[in-house]
Amino acid sequence: MSSAQATPEISRYRSRYLKLKSVLHDRATGYPAVAVLLDQLRSQLDGRRALGVLHVAIENLSLVESLYGWQVLDRVLCKVAFEIRESCGEELPKETLLAINAVAGDSFAAFVIERTDGREVDAAFMRANADALRGRLEAALGDDEFTGLGPQLKVQVGHALLSRNPFYRFERRVYAALNEAAAWETEQRHRRKRNLTHEIQRIIQDAKIKTVFQPVVDLRTHAVLGYEALSRGPADTPLERPQAMFRASAEAGISTDLDRSCREAALQALREIALPGKVFLNALAHGLADDEAQQVELLETLQQVALAPNDLVLEFSEREALQDPEDFADCLGRLKSRGFGIALDDIGTGYASQPVMEQVRPDYLKLDISLVRGIEENLIKQELMSSLVRISARIGASVIAEGVETQLEAQTLIDAGAQFGQGYLFAAPALPGTIVVSPRPGQEH
Amino acid sequence: MTDGQRILVVDDQQDIRDMTALVLSGAGYRVDTVDSGESALSALEQDRFDLVLLDINMPEMDGWETLRLIRCDEELTGLPVVMFSVKGEIRDKIESLQEGADDFVTKPFIVDDLIKRVGKVLAVAVNPVGGAQ
């Protein structure tokens, strides 16, 4: 046993160096921030009329994070960063300088110094570069193995020229050129957003939402506890995934309408085919707690299909509690007193708030896929899982692990004390009547 | 089997440092202790360690900042870091996950539990489960 010695000065320099590095280099991709390149850009512009600037952004990337967690977003960003790096010497000239627009950000900058033959860059050359890079990135993301979201990850590559102008400070010229390159892309994005809003309004008006169901099973026996109703927008559109619909509806200020219409669709599906066991139904806290009429409709529908009020488990995202935990708990309390079952969803996505769990005392805690994915090799995820299982026991809730895909994950979850699971290992979401639950290992025929 | 692997214990409280060092050296590890994040970074620059046990709540540079700096030092790629905290809060565990720690130990620890966890993290570091990614 000994005490390590280091002079205070060395310690201070070392930590200062690392501190500076940590704010100027992106951890996930290894790219430097644009500021790191300023000196290089200044000297490259010496004796040239202009440098080419590309601004690379991937639309809907935040969707990846909300669907699959930050780890998967990091992987997608690394893939984009890798492809841009590989494109230097292929789609782009070899000596192109690369940067991330902000550390921990999700858009990139490429500075093209000159053409491969040494001639100066011009607007036409940069447009061709932008198109070529977009093509490469679209192809690479199209077969994205992490998320299957490829088609929805729109690659945006804008271009501009960075020229010398002694009237302005050089640094500001660099950022202005990047903004100019991004502007074209932003315009495209706004146009698409406007279209999406119309699209959502039409989906709600024409009741175009379909409901699929995914079983929640006992991890050991695969016995079905119940089914979660999941909403789907029109097939093969960017709005097929409910998260995409909800995001667009939130931006348009109509998320309560969409929320209601998803439940309408689920109720309709339930009336047509009564499923055995519990029904898990997503809701926005205020959307349902303030909607007396729909609560009555829910209770009536349950009666029609011979289910008790607590057979309907309303799922609320823990993320909703972030803004006003007291108000959130109050909404859930009102619904609980009407006899509905309550589940807290998305537990473990970073906002875990023990007080809310203790106050609401839900019947189920649904643990987010990001805690489940690869849990067998991650000791902290196992530790978190055990803590959440302990809390659930204390407040009288059961744990449901979401997104279980492998037998190893399932076994680790069982070892950590989780009782229920949901995911492709057991069954994919499907229309009622077509749902098949896989047998547990050793029970296959 | 510890093969005399080296562990760096980082904690601003002397009694915790001494106790942890005693327990781990009793288990066959070679243990060094430092009392701040800054000294941890320079100790890591001077010597090779197999694992760092890092307190979260320290004055000046706390455990999170120290961990972030360790993770941006390419010389220290793959170095296992176990966070060490008096609070076993969910929030701290989620943050450990996001900042790239390898495990989380709540103080005061149970001796066998600490040794078991350290052993497990070291085993995973030597033989990672699964492929890259």
Image (cartoon, coloured by chain):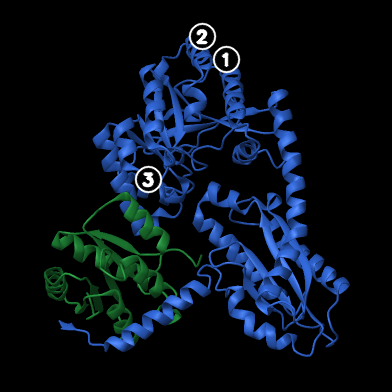
Residue B18, x across and y down, in percent = 12, 73
Q: Name the side, left or right, on which A431 lies relative to A352.
A: right
Q: Which amino acid does label 1 sit on?
A: Arg
Rate crowding at label 2 as few (under 14), some (14 to 19) or many (20 or more) other CA atoms within 10 Å. few
Q: Residue A441 carries which label?
A: none
Real-space Cα separation, disc 3 to disc 2, in angstroms: 37 Å
Q: Which of marks 3 and 1 is in front?
A: 3
Q: Is mark 2 on a helix, strand or loop?
A: helix
Residue B133, x across and y down, in percent = 51, 65
Real-space Cα separation, disc 3 to disc 1, in angstroms: 35 Å
Q: Which chain is blue?
A: A
Does residue A282 sit above or below A113 in this rendering?
A: above
**Are the residues at dot 2 and dot 1 in contact (C-beta closer than 8 Å)?**
yes
> Which residue is under mark 1?
A271
Residue B48 visible, this angle: no
Residue A176, x across and y down, in percent = 71, 69
> Which residue is under mark 2?
A304
Instruction: Give the letter of the chain under mark 2.
Output: A
> Which residue is under mark 3?
A352
Residue at image location 40% in from the left, 31% down from the top: A327
Shade representing chain B: green
Q: Do labels 3 and 2 share a chain?
A: yes
Tell me the quarter of the image containing the N terminus of chain A: bottom left
Residue at image location 36% in from the left, 69% down from the top: B65
